[in-house]
Amino acid sequence: MDYKNSYDRYWKRFIWSFIFAWSGLKNAFRHEQNIRIHFTIGLVIIVLSFLLNIPLFEKIILLLVIGVIISLEVMNTAIERVVDLVTKEYHPLARIAKDVSAGAVLIFSMFAVIIGILIFYKPVVELISNYIW
Ligand SMILES: Nc1ncnc2c1ncn2[C@@H]1O[C@H](COP(=O)(O)OP(=O)(O)OP(=O)(O)O)[C@@H](O)[C@H]1O
């Protein structure tokens, strides 16, 4: 019976952790413009990858990159909230924490742009040349 109880507790905790995570995502999506922008760009990229017949392996890379960027944005939001919780006053460490956290998103976004150009360059050039000739 003890085993049964702890099993139930384990699954309840597991399910509740998803509910809490979903609630955090809803909050971040509602309040963070950058997350909405990255989400929209991600959707556009996925639709374009189907329209331009991008190979499956490259589609998987694009999905991975989009997932990492949105996750980084969510993590950046969490750091911003913790900093705001610690101090509402101006503090050089608060500035550094927020700026460094935003810097992490910026670095990956720049690599994402390079990956996007490498993947889309050839199909887009082919599409344009087919359209012109
Ligand atoms: N408590 C603080 N002390 C010092 N500088 C701060 C503080 N809070 C914010 N800043 C600076 O202001 C910038 C903008 O911060 P703010 O929290 O307004 O926007 P954000 O970090 O982009 O968050 P949000 O996306 O919610 O607007 C930060 O990147 C940081 O440089």
Image (tube, helix red, strand yellow):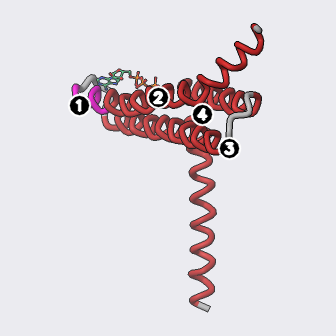
Q: Earlier in the sequence, mark 2 or mark 3?
A: 3
Given the image, on which type of amino acid does mark 1 rest?
Leu
Given the image, on which type of amino acid does mark 4 rest?
Phe
Q: Earlier in the sequence, mark 1 or mark 2?
A: 1
Give the quarter of the image for residue 61.
Answer: top right
Gap between marks 3 and 1, in whole Å? 44 Å
User: Residue 12 versus residue 121: which sits nearer the camera?
Assistant: 121
Q: Earlier in the sequence, mark 1 or mark 4?
A: 4
Question: Which label belongs to residue 56?
Answer: 3
Question: Which label belongs to residue 93?
Answer: 1
Mark 1 touches mark 2? (CB < 8 Å) = no
Given the image, on which type of amino acid does mark 2 rest?
Ser
Q: Residue at x 55, y 28 (%)?
A: 116
Residues in magenta? 92-97
Does residue 112 appear to the left or right of 40 in the view shown? left
Question: Which label belongs to residue 29?
Answer: 4
Most extreme residue toward the top is 132
Gap between marks 3 and 4, in whole Å? 29 Å
